[in-house]
Image (cartoon, rainbow, N blue to C red):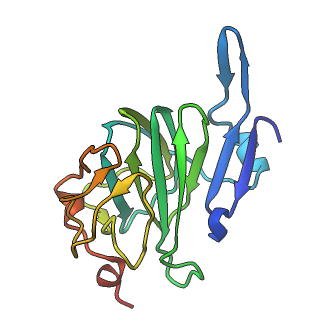
Amino acid sequence: MGQIQVEKNVGGIDGLCIIQPAVHGDNRGYFMETYNQRDMQEAGLDMVFVQDNQSCSVKGVLRGLHFQKEFPQGKLVRVIKGSVFDVAVDLRGGSETYGKWFGVELTEENKKQFYIPQGFAHGFLVLSDVAEFCYKCTDFYHPGDEGGLAWNDPEIGINWPQLQGTYQGSASAEGYTLEDGTPLNLSDKDQKWLGIGDTFKF
């Protein structure tokens, strides 16, 4: 199967995949294919990507949990500098794992990639001093289409590594720090999302 190894349905959640590219290194450095459509198709992953994004964040930043309302995106995410804890939450109606989360540490050293299909909320916490984060998307960005969930919703129960603090009934970052004292850093918008039960009422 070429240059990748694929672990499918990680965490027991259908569709989530961890992808490990083959890294060819010597005393000069390394080379790897970060994406190969043929290898992905041979692994049963036939998504088509239309947009690449990159962000840079400092330690303690938590981005998420975000999802798209009308134009859902599949995302293939990786870290090219630093380390993040990356999380996906299943929001697919009728899914046996609805509301279940899975997280994986992505670092510039392990070079893992995480594929998150359409129908999931996504977020990450920066564990290193700085992290540069890259992701491919299966649909274009549509302004005004973003939704979100509280990153600390007890109903979901994400175990964010190195994070200390006590849930106070909202998504506020107040009172939360990493183990080394770095304050948790969220956007104003990400501190106002509600929990999964209040966001989706079936």
Q: Position of residue 129 (x, y in %)?
A: 35, 32
Q: Position of residue 122 (x, y in %)?
A: 43, 59
- 157 and 188: which is toward the camera: 157
Q: Position of residue 31 (x, y in %)?
A: 67, 21
Work out which quarter of the rendered image holds the N terminus and state it.
top right
- 165 and 7: which is toward the camera: 165
Work out which quarter of the rendered image holds the C terminus and state it.
bottom left
Q: Position of residue 139 (x, y in %)?
A: 45, 53
Q: Is residue 7 left or right of residue 190?
A: right
Above or below for 100 versus 22: below
Locate residue 70: give its quadrant: bottom left
Count of numbered marks: 0
Above or below for 200 versus 111: below
Residue at 64% across / 14% down in the picture? 29
Q: Which residue is outermost to the right?
A: 1
On the question of residue 95 being in view, the answer is yes
Residue at 64% across / 51% down in the picture? 18
Q: Which residue is outermost to the bottom?
A: 202
Locate residue 84: give its quadrant: top left
Residue at 52% across / 74% down in the picture? 100
On the question of residue 14 being in view, the answer is no
Q: Is residue 195 left or right of residue 43?
A: left
Q: Is residue 143 left or right of residue 27?
A: left
- 96 and 164: which is toward the camera: 164
